[in-house]
Amino acid sequence: MALWAQAQQLQGEALHRMQSLYGQHFPIEVRHYLAQWIEAQPWDAVDPENTQEEFKAKRLLDSLIQELQKRAEHQVGEDGFLLKIKLGHYATQLKSTYDRCPLELVRSIKHILYNEERLVQEAMNVTSPAGGTIDGTSQKYQQINQTFEELRVMTQDTENDLRKLQHSQEYFIIQYQESLRIQAQINSLANLPPTERVQRESSLQSKRATVEAWLTREANTLLKYRQDLAEKMQKTLASLRKQQTVILDDELIQWKRRQQLAGNGGPQEGGLDILQSWCEKLADTIWQNRQQIRRVEHLTQQLPIPGPTEELLSELNTTITDIISTLVTSTFIIEKQPPQVLKTQTKFAATVRFLVGGKLNVHMNPPQVKAIIISEQQAKALVKNENTRNDSSGDILNNNCVMEYHQTTGTLSAHFRNMSLKRIKRSDRRGAESVTEEKFTVLFESQFTVGGNELVFHVKTLSLPVVVIVHGSQDNNATATVLWDNAFSEPGRVPFVVPDKVLWPQLCEALNMKYKAEMQSNRGLSEENLVFLAQKAFSNCSNNPEDYRSMTMTWSQFNRENLPGRTFTFWQWFDGVMELMKRHLRAHWNDGAILGFVNKQQAQDMLMSKPNRTFLLRFSDSEIGGITIAWVAENPNKAGERMVWNLMPFTTKDFTIRSLADRISDLNHLHFLYPSQPKDEVFSRYYSPPHSKPVDGYVKPEINFTSTPPDPSPGTPSFVDQAVSPTVNQPHAFNLYSGMSDSMMDPDGEFDLEVETMDMARQVEEFLRQPIENRWGGQQS
């Protein structure tokens, strides 16, 4: 069912909240008549914060206007006449509103659609179709909303009692004035004759006694009213603080944790609009209770009656101020984090948002936000409230920004779009720590007033840890530091403490999350893949996953110490695999064509049970970011014997020249992808199209060998039916090696390029010496 059709079925408070999304900025009638068109547009493909995408937003605005005008033109009849006028008016209105700022239209519609979907989802999750229990998230949300309703009732109850107290006190003052008037009359009797004075004085004294007795009783009643009211307020504030703790210390902290895990490839954090709506409700309730406390204070000052109420009111004032301070300082957050691997002299962006800024009218005098970069030690001192004198550890250009209020979404935020780290000041490093292990953070701070300059707040928030690099070659190790921190940091930690070692299953979860994100796929690392990684990480031969569950991996093992016999760390090898896959082989991984995490012996065992010409793709053990093709074929040196052959690993450099699919197509001795799929079924859709006819007498500079090279001499471990079709500068096209040891192979069984390519190089040289017409079958050159 379409979203709009579901939204129209909302009832009660949900329906009211849905209707409140619309107004002059975007009329609900436009949503109704263009529902299908609106939901079909790629709103999510446009970033309202990126001014470079304004042309996309303008195109959407123009299309919206055209749709409205088209719908207006098709209206006929008496009812259609009025609708035609109305839709035409809306088209003009929207064009006038958004023509100069089309990104605001995108922001508005994204906000509307997101909230409609959330309201519909909340309504659907209230009960299951069979009337069963609600799910955990919905139950939690329902509990929060129920508590808000209880707070609303408590606050309203207090308001009613406060009005009663005010009316009673006003009547008391009137009666007190009456008592003073009677006393004045008694005093004026001194000028009357004695007989008349006695008669009237007796009557006035009786009235005064009655009024004073009433005043005494009423004073005690007023005192009790005040005491009861203060105790009710105490209970309300206790519930309010508890609700605020749930939202700020549970829900907001969880959102921040999801934001941190998103840096490792976890799902997008989402849910910030829900959090803002809760925080705004908190702000409303807190402010109402604060005003009530102040009104009670005013009443006690207006009519002082000795009692314990004054002390209780003082406590209430302190509590409510503390609650609102916590809300304000906690809801100044970073909506879009700066990049966690930050290169100097490179533009970067970030967005800071104040969740209750609109509700507290902070936007009436928009505050300025400043960004500075500080070290880990400075961040620790800041958290401990030690005086750091706001010294920075570097210079950020364009680091000041005024907060903007977006009326359509009700958000108050500062968008830093063009920051750049000009220089960084590093601290003395400890022990084996490298520059790519040193953590910094971007501190955002601002100052503003609330309640007509009544309360002044200085707010600060720290970004996730940032590793500063000066060259792209440092990116790999910096990413390792960020991944470890994002995965294993604890909420509320001292900046930026992380455990030095973690359980292997914990690391597997982090690696799998990162890998799936890089592959943009649900196909992550299988249990067999993780066993392979464990074997590599711990130099262990066990194939049983249970053997690794209690093992721990230290940071040093992860990215300080090289793997045994290698010149790189575990992380550097894994990151090299991800980089290769992301840039060139993602589609093949998602198709299931690449096994990848298989060692040489495993590949041999797997292939020897399959028919000749069966092959598989595995990651190189010896080269970062390398992938090799292993296949089974006859041993040319021993009749009837089969063996597994391995191509020299391909790297990013090779795939930049010619794709994996084309290379596999070139190798005619590869027939079946393990276990038994014909290779064309798997790879044909990725083959490059056949060459078109020469243009202006020229052809692409690509050399194809169609003849089979001479049979290898006895003892030469090479195998090829048809050579690869390389470009002239393709280095690894003909380098093959078997699983057997050979004097021409390196310790990993890989051929020495210079030795093994000599014969093929001579063939290329002879080929190039041929006349053009012989080479290309008579084509012009």
Image (cartoon, rainbow, N blue to C red):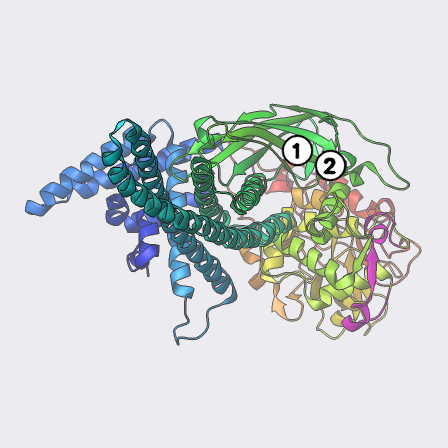
- Amino acid of disc 1: Leu
Query: Residue 130 location in percent, x, y?
Result: 39, 76
Mark 1 crowd level (few <14, some 14–19, many ≥20, 10 Å Cα): many
Q: Quadrant of residue 425?
A: top right
Front position in the image: 452 or 156: 156
Look at the numbered disc 2 and give the secondary structure of its residue.
helix
Instruction: Find the residue positioned furthest to the right.
Output: 743
The reply, left or right, for residue 345 in relation to residue 243 is right
Residue under the point 25% across and 38% down: 200
Where the C terminus falls, by quadrant?
Answer: top right
Residue under the point 35% across and 39% down: 176
Q: In this picture, which residue range is highlighted in magenta?
A: 540-563
Query: Residue 498 location in percent, x, y?
Result: 77, 49
Tag 1–tag 2 contact (CB < 8 Å): yes
Magenta stretch encompasses residue 376: no
Tell me if residue 199 comes above or below residue 543 in the rendering. Answer: above
- Amino acid of disc 2: Ala
Residue under the point 36% across and 50% down: 160
The reply, left or right, for residue 67 in relation to residue 757 is left
Query: Residue 440 location in percent, x, y?
Result: 73, 36
Mark 2 crowd level (few <14, some 14–19, many ≥20, 10 Å Cα): many
Residue under the point 86% across and 32% down: 428
Q: Which residue is mark 2?
A: 379
Where the N terminus falls, by quadrant?
Answer: bottom left
Residue 140 showing in the rendered view: yes
Q: Which residue is mark 1?
A: 443
Look at the numbered disc 1 and give the secondary structure of its residue.
strand
